[in-house]
Amino acid sequence: MSIELDSHRTLTAARGRAAQRGLTTRQAVADRAFRVALLGATLLFVALVAGLFIELVHGSWESIVTFGAGFLWSSEWNPVTNHFGALPFIYGTLVSSAIAIVIAGVVGISAAVFLAEFAHPVVARPVSFFIELLAAVPSVVFGLWGLFVLAPILGHTVEPFIQRYLGFLPFFSGPIYGVGLFTAGLLLALMIVPTVSAIARDLIQAVPNELREASIALGATRWETATRIVLPSARSGIVGACVLALGRALGETIAATMVIGNRPAISASLFAPGYTLSSVIANEFTEATSSIYLSALLELGLILFVVSVVVNGCARILMWSMLRSQGRRS
Amino acid sequence: MIAGARLAASRRVSGLVGVILTGFCSALAAGLLILILGYVVVQGWGAINPAFLTQLPHPVGVSGGGVANGIVGTLIIVALAMLMAVPVGVLTGLYLAIYGRGLTAECVRFLAEVLSGVPSIAIGLFAYTILVQPFRHFSGLSAAFAFAILMLPLMIRTSEEAIRGVPTAIREGALALGLPDYGGVIHVVLPAARPLIVTGLLLAIARVTGETAPLLFTAFGSEFWELNPGNPMATLAMQIFKYAISPYDDWHRQAWGGALLLILAVLVLNVGARWALRGRAKRS
C-alpha cells in the first residue's frame, strides 16, 4: 500500500513538473484537452445514468399524478377503462424471484463450497468454467428451452407429482398449465446460479487460510471447517452475492415472459400463471394506445429501476464491507 | 473412548455426505449448460442450411425462409453500440485509473456497479423516451444506444483495471523521457493495456448480442432487408423470441436454428475472451 502511495506521489510530482519541463505551448494545450476529454467522458456517463432516472420519472409522471401511491397496491389493470394498478405484476415478480433465489442460493452456495474447499483443481477448473459459461447463455435461449423442454416436463410430471402429495397446501393446488410462477421461478434460478456460485466461490477463497488451519488443528473435520468457520466468515459477502443475483432475477424479462403464462392475476397457487413487471412492459409497450397507458407502463419500468438500484447498492455495500474487514484482519 | 469413536464416525459420515451433496450441486449447475447446449445443437442443427442463413423470413404458411436480415441487423446494431460505448467507456476508465482517488471517482465506480444491475428493459425504456418518442418512429440507432449503455459498466471496469495493471514504472518512464501526460497515456499506457481492454470489449459484446428485451420497443423488428439504422431493424434474438411464442411448427424449428447461431456466437466470444486472458496471465 505504502509503495503504491509513494509511486503515486512521484507520478503526481512528475506531472506537476511537466509544465516546467519545457513542454511547448501546443503540448500544454493538448495536455489540458486530454484531461478535459477524460473528465468529459466521465461526466457524460454520470449524465446518462441521471438521465435514465429523470426520463423514467418524466415519462411516468402522468401515471404518478393520476394514480398516486395507490398504483402500488391496486390490482386492476384495465386498458379499456384506463385504470392501472401494479399489484399483480409486483406479486408475480416477487414470487418468481423468491423461488429463484431460494433454489439458486442453495445450489449456488453448495457448488461454491465444493469448488473452493473440496474439489481438486483438475475438477474445479472445468466445472467452474462451465458454470460461468452458463451465465453467458442469452436469456432468449433460456426462454426457448424453458418453454419447450422445462415447462412440459414440469406440467406433465413434476407438478402433478407434487400436487398428489402436497395438494392440500394452497401453494400447490389448482389446475396445472405447465407455464406459471413455479416454472418461471425455476428457470430464473438456473439463470442466476452462476452469479451466486462464481462470486461465493471467490469470496470463500478469499477467507484467510489461517482460519482453516486453526480449525483443523483444533480437531475439526474439513466439512466442519468449511461450514462452521469458512462460510460464516464469508457470510456478509455471500449474502451480498445472493442479493445481487436476486436483482438479476427481478429484472429478467424475456425468459420470464416466455414461461410465466402472462396473466395479471394474483393466486396463491404457484402452478398458476402470473405476470411480472418486466414481462408486461415487454408484451404491452408497443400496443399501448393511450398516453396514460404508456405512462403506467413507464412507471412499472421506474419501479424496476428503483428496486434494482436499491438491491444492487445493498449487495455492493455488503460485499465491500466483507472484503474490507478481511483486509483489515489480515 | 467408545463414545468418542462413535462420534468421530458420525462426523466423518456427515462430512462425506456433505461433500457428495455439494459435489452433486456443482455437477448439476455445470451439467445444465451441457444439457441446454446439447438440446439446442440437436434441435437447431436440422434448421440450419444455406437458405436459413441467406434468405429473408417468409410469410406465415410459406415454409422455408431465413434470418439473414436478423443476422445483419444484429451486426449493425452491435457495431454502432460499440462505436458509442468504446470511447466513453475507455476514457472514463482512464479517468478513474489516473485521477480516480477522491470521493467523486468512488461515486462514479459505484454508479457503474449499480448500472450493471439495472434491468435491460428499463434501459430500453430510456432509449425509447429519448430516441424513439421524439422522432415518432422506431430505429436501429435507438437500439444501439440502449446496447451502448448496457456495455458501459463492463467497459469502464475492465478499462480501469487494464490501465491500473500497467506497471507504474512504465508510466514514470514515459514522463521521464519528456512525454507530456497525454503522450504517455496514448503511446505507452494504452498499447500496454490494449489486450485486456479488448477482452472486456468482447465480453461486453457477448452480453448485448443475446439481449432481446430492450429491442422490442427500440429496434422493433422488420421483415425486410434494412441497412439504414434510422429505420426499424430486425435482430436475431428478436426473431427467436417471435418464432418461439408463435403457434407454427416451422417457426419453432427456425427458433431453434436461430438459438444455435446465437449461442455459438456468444460462447465463441466468451471463450475467446477468456482464452486471450489466460494466455496473457501465463506470459507475465
Image (tube, coloured by chain):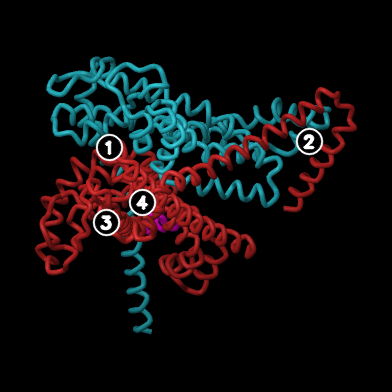
Mark 2 or mark 4, whichever is nearer to me? 4
The three-letter code of the residue at mark 1 reads Glu
The three-letter code of the residue at mark 2 reads Glu
Mark 4 or mark 3, whichever is nearer to me? 3
- Left or right side of B87 for B267: left
Coordinates of residue A275 in the picture (x, y in percent): 25, 51
Mark 4 or mark 1, whichever is nearer to me? 1
Decide which of tag 4 and tag 3 comes sooner along the chain.
3
Decide which of tag 4 and tag 1 comes sooner along the chain.
4
Q: What secondary structure is found at the residue carrying circle 4?
A: helix
With respect to residue A202, does A210 lie above or below?
below
What is the magenta range?
Answer: A110-120
Contact between marks 1 and 2 (CB within 8 A): the answer is no
Residue A122 in the magenta stretch? The answer is no
Whole-Å distance between the Cαs marked 3 and 2?
60 Å
Question: Which shade is chain A?
Answer: red
Residue drawn at 82 percent across, 28 percent down:
A28
Whole-Å distance between the Cαs marked 2 and 4?
46 Å
Mark 3 or mark 1, whichever is nearer to me? 1
The three-letter code of the residue at mark 3 reads Pro
The three-letter code of the residue at mark 4 reads Ala
Residue that mark 3 sits on: A88
Residue that mark 2 sits on: B172
- The chain identifier of the residue carrying mark 2 reads B
Residue A103 in sight in this render? no
Q: What secondary structure is found at the residue carrying circle 2?
A: helix
Residue A117 in the magenta stretch? The answer is yes
Contact between marks 2 and 4 (CB within 8 A): the answer is no
Mark 3 or mark 2, whichever is nearer to me? 3
Q: Nearer the viewer, residue B236 or A233?
A: B236
- The chain identifier of the residue carrying mark 4 reads A
